[in-house]
Image (spheres, rainbow, N blue to C red):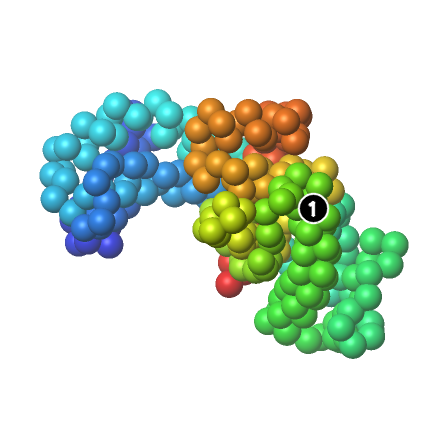
Amino acid sequence: MSGPDGLPVHACGGNEHARIAVDIVRSPRRKNLAVHVSAKGEVQVRAPLRASDPLIARFLDTHRDWIMRKVADAQRHPPWQPRWQAGGDWFWRGERIVFVGGGPRGGYLLDGQLALPLRAQDGSERWQRAVLGWHRREAERLLEARARELFSQHAAPHRLQRVEFRWMRATWGTCGGKRAADKRRDVVLRLNPWLAALPPHLCDAILLHELAHVEHMNHGAGFYRRLAEINPLWREHDRELRPWARRLLPLLTA
């Protein structure tokens, strides 16, 4: 098996029966080696363009125990796979809901059932498009209102210029923006619609994390002091978020 750059894929793990294929992705922009284990247990090394195979092999050996633990964890907790048909399940505000046909145009959620304007015999692509369309519309309405509410409470006197939405596989959201001449920041929040699938307190935890970046555009000590001020339970919330990230972020939602 070969990686995207045409080189042989390295194997990780001393036990021949537990060897793991590793993709190598080289980039001229990258300066350091990094390893990533996806929620599906796929291992990828991101390397500088001129990093040698022996260097990558030594790097993998140094991180072997961590990689094996992450892969084993991914195998124990595989990503959730929705069934794109009548009676399939979905997540909304931390609760499982079931989507059914026969609903009004645009869809309607009541008592744990999402009624969509489809028939049971409609194909999986139509069900997927309808569910994701409903989710995104409702998520944008819900999340923008909540983001603006929390911004007014915790990020004044800065200015929230806009809230954007994008399905993302690796992050719940980002915060950006430059300081103006008056030293206030013009902020742009980019949020993953998956946030609306989380329990409300974990959705708020993500939003507060991004708002802590308004003053500190990094993850330094100042950022964590600010985060602790606006969300004293952030460590507990981070632990709660891990299984949700494994469950939701790997889904193909683009």
**Horizontal placement of 223 versus 44: left or right?**
right
Residue 47 percent coordinates (x, y): 22, 42
Q: Is residue 245 above or below residue 59?
A: below
Question: Vertically, is 51 above or below 142?
Answer: above
Q: Quadrant of residue 243?
A: top right
The residue located at (63%, 39%) in the rendering is: 208
Q: Which residue is mark 1?
A: 152
Say which quarter of the image contains residue 164: bottom right
Which of the 4 image quarters holds residue 121?
bottom right
Q: Is residue 233 left or right of residue 161?
A: right
Looking at the image, which is closer to me, 246 or 2? 246
Q: Give the total of numbered labels.
A: 1
13 relative to 195, above or below: above
Query: Which residue is outermost to the front?
Result: 182
**Where does residue 232 sit, x and y in percent of width and height?**
66, 25
Residue 251 visible, this orientation: no
Instruction: Tell me the crowding category of disc 1: few under 14, some 14 to 19, or many 20 or more residues within 10 angstroms, Cα based.
Output: some
Residue 235 in percent (x, y) is at: 59, 25
Q: Secondary structure at mark 1?
A: helix
Left or right, 88 with respect to 27, comes to right
